[in-house]
Amino acid sequence: MSEHLPQEFWQGVEQFNSGQFYACHDTLEALWIEATEPEKSLYQGILQIAVALYHLSNRNLRGAMILLGEGSNRLRRYPGNDYGINVEELLLESVKFFKALQQTDPEKIASGDWHETAALPLPRISMIQKLK
């Protein structure tokens, strides 16, 4: 199915992995609005995780937690790796990140020091290369 995904999807993946979370949101939202299932929920899940990370950079813990949960729940619908990305790995990293945030002192997040904690690696989107 990955060969059917538009170039903008791959641009959104690049933006996500380079920490351009708001730009990723904009790119994937444009696709999401026009998409049909099953891609529609995939785009939405990824963009919700991107917005969660954007909220966190703005010290909005509540918004980050809500969107991490919603985005992760959407990605649970994609157990396979049909889209050229490792959806399962993104889901696992996002859930792990969510749990680590729950364990982090809210004062650290409010002060912006959360990213210095090694227990909080940001989720990334890994590509899957098909064997020929």
Image (spheres, rainbow, N blue to C red):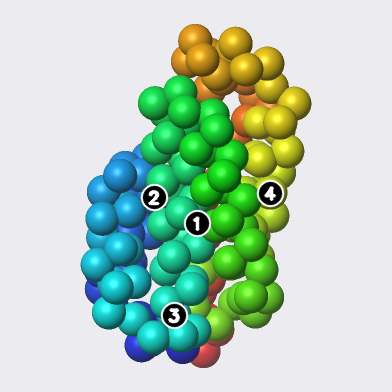
**Tag 1: residue type?**
Ile
What is the CA distance from the residue labelled 4 to the residue labelled 1? 14 Å
Q: Are marks 4 and 1 in contact (CB under 8 Å)?
A: no
Label ID, residue 125: 1
The residue beneath circle 4 is 95
User: Could you tell me which residue is drawn at 51 percent across and 89 percent down?
Assistant: 132
Give the camera-side residue of 117 and 131.
117
Query: Which comes before the other along the chain, label 2 or label 1?
Result: 2
Mark nearer the viewer, 2 or 3: 3
Q: CA distance from mark 2 to mark 3?
A: 17 Å
Question: What distance separates the C-alpha of mark 4 from that of mark 2?
Answer: 17 Å
Q: Earlier in the sequence, mark 2 or mark 3?
A: 2
Q: Residues within 10 Å of mark 4 (few under 14, many from 20)?
A: some
* Mark 3 vs mark 1: in front: 3
- Identify the residue under disc 2: 16
Q: CA distance from mark 3 to mark 4?
A: 21 Å
Q: Nearer the viewer, mark 4 or mark 2?
A: 4
Q: Tell whether 119 sits left or right of 70.
A: right
Q: Point out residue 73 in the picture as x, y percentages from the top left corner.
A: 64, 62
The residue shown at (60%, 35%) is 121
Q: Amino acid at mark 4?
A: Val
Q: Nearer the viewer, residue 48 or 79?
A: 48
Location of residue 65 by image quarter: top right
Residue 18, horizontal then vertical, whole percent: 36, 43
Q: Amino acid at mark 3?
A: Glu
Secondary structure, mark 3, is helix
Q: Residue tagged by mark 3?
A: 39
Q: Does 22 sit left or right of 66 as displayed?
A: left
